[in-house]
Amino acid sequence: MPAKLRNLELILLTFACLLNGGAVVLVQLGALGEIQTDIIWLGGGLAALAIGLHIALRFVAPQADPFILPIATLLNGIGIAEIYRLDIAAKHVGWGADGIRQIVWTAIAMAIALGVIILIRNHRVLQRYRYIAMFTGIVLLLLPMLPLIGYEQFGARLWIRLGIFSFQPGEFAKIALAVFFAGYLVQARDSLSLVGRRFLGMRFPRARDLGPILVIWAAAMGVLIIQRDLGTSLLYFGLFLVMIYVATGRLSWIVLGLLLFVGGAIVASQLFGYVASRFHGWLDAFNPDVYGAAGGSYQLVQGLFGLAHGGLIGTGLGEGRPQIVPLAESDYIMASLGEELGLAGLFAIFALYLILVSRGMRIGFAGQDDFGRLLGVGLSFVIALQVFIVVGGVTRVIPLTGLTTPFLAAGGSSLVANWVIVALLLRLTDTVRHQPRLVVSP
């Protein structure tokens, strides 16, 4: 019943916009002691765009999931409020403020998401272009390696610069690779799942069938070694590993994949200094020598202190000191939010991510075509794994990486890519509801 779905979405979206506006007001009261209307008007413009996207869904995707758009809007707004709070602390104004740029990028991302929904009327069209998606993903991965446009920042070579604009092509490569993986695994599923030898209760693939996982492993190790980014390599390899497991149902792929990645990461930590420094900062973070070293554990420890300062209920928006942590608006946005919203606030944010991912995973159970099921699981898992990698690094569960938190962290590339994922999930959920159901008569 499309009307009920869209009405529910409108109610949730209105509530999300009100929460976002309230967060900005609380930031101003806590950090400035007064309410300034300029940023509120800009936020109102984003709320109008979100409502416009909702209205468009009533016509182009009337049966899309009603929870995805409100959750993405709420997460995006919470991130803007915290980035704006950091701008106040740093006295950044105008285009030099990360919060203003984040608002502009959000508007661009929402417009692109609307374009994706209108352009792609049926997700099965993407299956025809799986090899084009593969080529596009590889090109995007290689772009930062080009001498004229690629450049290194914060110790990783992940960005390209075209004139005054710079972006991270790897954020879009994950979408292209998810499309390719889904299309490839639909074709190769039988050979990857039915043939092989049993060992320790698991059926392992033949040597000739190990090609795909070895190619993706080599690409992940290349990102780790050449681009110096542990998080991105883990994201790409983890995406393929989960999708091949969903496609085949064989636990042996997970075992082989984990052994390959962990083994490669250990070898890289012994051969390359930048990987070793990440491991030293993780394992011995409170060692004074590691803490004070260049590229050491200063950022990690300061983030942990910020989380401890926030405690259970936080200091309140605008009342903490998240600006002490380096890159608090991007890599460490979760530590900033944890200090001001506390453990309770972080759990609420995690619950939003959990619902968003679960609505995407639901496609894997409700979908009738294998390509759509794999694509829905892959896109949802990208968000889930990225959140785990970021939060795990901030809380010292795993080594710190340079990934950004979806929708929350400052950065135009990540924001646009994640809104494209939202658009594809909306299209998938709409198509799934339109599919005919199999009825078995008694």
Image (cartoon, helix red, strand yellow):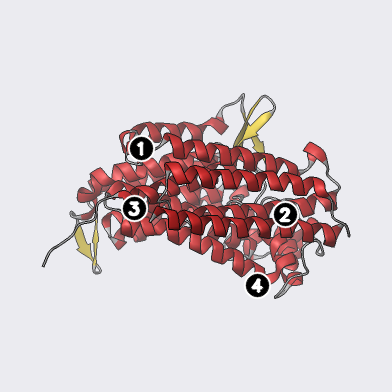
| 174 horizontally vs 193: left or right | right
Q: Amino acid at mark 2?
A: Ala
Amino acid found under the numbered disc labelled 3: Arg
Q: How far apart in space, not on screen, are marks 3 and 4 (Cα)?
A: 35 Å
**Disc on the earlier residue, 1 or 2:** 2
Q: Amino acid at mark 1?
A: Leu
Position of 266 with respect to 101 (left or right) is left
| Foreground disc of the pair 2, 4 | 2
Q: Gap between marks 1 and 3, in whole Å?
A: 18 Å
- Which residue is pictured at 60% across the width and 26% down the height? 147
Per the image, the residue denoted by label 2 is 81
Q: Which residue was labeled with disc 4? A: 344
Q: Which residue is mark 3?
A: 433
Above or below, comparing residue 36 to residue 108 in the picture: below
| Residue 362 seen | yes
Q: Residue at x 38, y 42 (%)?
A: 179
111 relative to 98 in the view: left or right: left
Q: Which residue is mark 1?
A: 126
Q: Residue at x 44, y 32 (%)?
A: 136
Q: Earlier in the sequence, mark 1 or mark 4?
A: 1
Which element type, helix, strand or loop, lies under badge 1? helix
